[in-house]
Each structure stands twice: as structure tokens, then as C-alpha cells.
């Protein structure tokens, strides 16, 4: 009987961690949107953002734990997004990743939906903020994750750019909460 009570307390605690993590994720995304909304009259944000275009990217990606023994995954990501405007210029789409753990030889797959708002654009430099949510699968059980993310872009031509992205993930199912794992990626993108 006492063991069941402890399990119920642990489940409630995990649900509260999930609710807090989602709250942090929503607050972070809202903060990006509010900050960018306040900056729409600033001279560094342009009003002539390309809308209704497709974006295709290819990147090398990885993730590393931030506490304890460093565990790292490395792989590649392909994404397809579409630009538009929701208060600020927005790019939303889907990403597919394949990652490899060199220690165990495990292969991990990730499918995520993302939305990134353009917060600042100055000459050929662009700063985006947003979030992604999706599933991780492969040599592991199915795991739902969400992550606030920040991306920088350096436009080399009007339709070609280099980018770097950093995210911090939150697990959404069993044992929900921050994972102390930093995700990153560096790649190229093209507007179609």
C-alpha cells in the first residue's frame, strides 16, 4: 500500500514537472515574440521580408549532456519549411534527423515540427527564435520532446544562407522535464 502511494506521488511530481516545463517553453516562446513585437519599429528589422517561400536546409547536428558524464550524439538533419507572417516573419516546417551514438552504435531518428520567428535582421545577418516539438525513435522507445531554440543566419545570396542553431530539450512523456541536453546544428539553407 505504501509503495502505491509513493508511485502516485512520483506520478504527480512528474506531471507537475511536465506542466512547469511546458510553461517555461511557452513563456520562452512568448518572450521571443513579445521582444520581437516591440522591436518591429526598430531600424534593424526590415519590413520587406520574403513571404510565401519554401526553405530547404541540410545540417550536421548533435546533442551533448550538460551535467554528469558527457554523452554526445552526432548526425544529420534535413528540413523543409515555409515562410509567412504571424505578427513577425515566421518560418514553420518539419525536420527529419538521423543521429548516431559512437559509443553504443545506436541509431536514433527524430521527426519534429518547428516554428521560428525572425527577431532581428541587419544587413546579411538574421536572428530567429522559436520552438520545435516532435518524437525521437529508433534504437529506443518512443520519446516526445519539445525545445525552445535560437538560430542565426548569414545570408550569402538572396536565396542561400549558412546557419547555426542551438536548442535545449524537454522530455514530454514518462519522466517529463528538462533533459540537461544541449542540441546544436550547423548547416546550409536555400529558399526555393
Image (cartoon, helix red, strand yellow):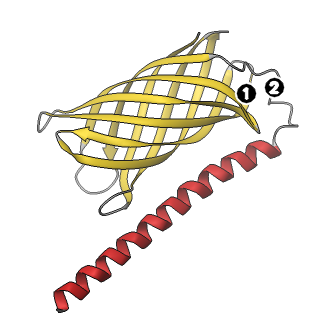
Q: Is 85 situated left or right of 129 in this image?
A: right
Kind of element beneath mark 2: loop
Q: Residue 121, which numbered label?
A: 1
Residue 28 x %, y %: 60, 53
Q: Up-down: is 166 above or below 148? A: above
**Foreground residue among 20 and 121:** 20
Counting from the top left corner in percent of width and height, residue 86 is at 73, 37
- The N terminus lies in quadrant: bottom left
Q: Which quadrant does the C terminus fall into?
A: top right
- Find the residue positioned furthest to the left: 104
Residue 88: name its quadrant: top right
- Identify the residue at horizontal 50%, vertical 28% (top origin): 164
Residue drawn where x is 29% and y is 77% of the image = 10
Q: Position of residue 154 (x, y in %)?
A: 61, 20
Sequence-wise first label, 2 or 1: 2
99 above or below 17? above
Label 1 crowd (10 A; few <14 / some 14-19 / many >=20): some
In which image quadrant can residue 43 be found? top right
Q: Is residue 39 above or below residue 16?
A: above
Number of callouts in the render? 2
- Label 2 CA crowd tier, 10 Å (few <14, some 14–19, many 20+): some
Give the answer, above or below, for where 52 lies relative to 179: above
Query: Relative to residue 173, is residue 56 drawn left or right?
Result: right
Image quadrant where residue 17 sits? bottom left
Tell me if 121 is positioned left or right of 164 in this view: right
| Residue at image location 56% in from the left, 33% down from the top | 151
Q: Which mark is residue 150?
A: none
Q: Which residue is mark 2?
A: 46
Disc 2 to disc 1: CB gap under 8 Å? yes
Answer left or right for 164 relative to 192: left
Q: Name the residue at 81% across, 41% down.
A: 39
Question: Element under label 1?
Answer: strand
Amino acid at each position: 500500500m505504501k509503495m502505491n502511494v509513493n508511485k502516485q506521488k512520483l506520478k504527480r511530481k512528474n506531471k507537475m514537472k511536465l506542466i512547469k516545463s511546458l510553461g517555461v517553453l511557452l513563456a520562452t516562446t512568448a518572450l521571443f515574440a513579445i521582444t520581437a513585437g516591440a522591436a518591429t519599429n526598430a531600424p534593424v528589422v526590415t519590413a520587406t521580408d520574403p513571404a510565401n517561400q519554401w526553405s530547404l536546409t541540410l545540417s550536421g547536428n548533435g546533442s551533448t549532456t550538460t551535467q554528469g558524464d558527457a554523452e554526445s550524439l552526432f548526425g544529420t538533419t534535413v528540413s523543409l519549411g515555409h515562410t509567412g507572417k504571424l505578427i513577425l516573419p515566421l518560418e514553420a516546417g518539419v525536420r527529419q534527423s538521423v543521429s548516431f551514438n559512437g559509443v553504443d552504435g545506436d541509431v536514433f531518428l527524430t521527426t519534429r515540427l518547428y516554428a521560428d520567428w525572425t527577431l532581428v535582421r541587419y544587413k546579411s545577418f538574421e536572428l530567429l527564435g522559436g520552438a520545435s516539438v516532435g518524437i525521437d525513435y529508433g534504437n529506443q522507445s518512443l520519446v516526445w520532446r519539445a525545445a525552445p531554440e535560437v538560430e542565426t543566419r548569414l545570408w550569402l545570396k538572396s536565396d542561400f544562407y549558412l546557419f547555426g542553431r542551438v536548442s535545449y530539450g524537454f522530455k514530454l512523456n514518462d519522466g517529463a522535464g528538462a533533459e540537461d541536453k544541449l542540441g546544436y546544428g550547423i548547416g546550409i539553407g536555400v529558399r526555393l
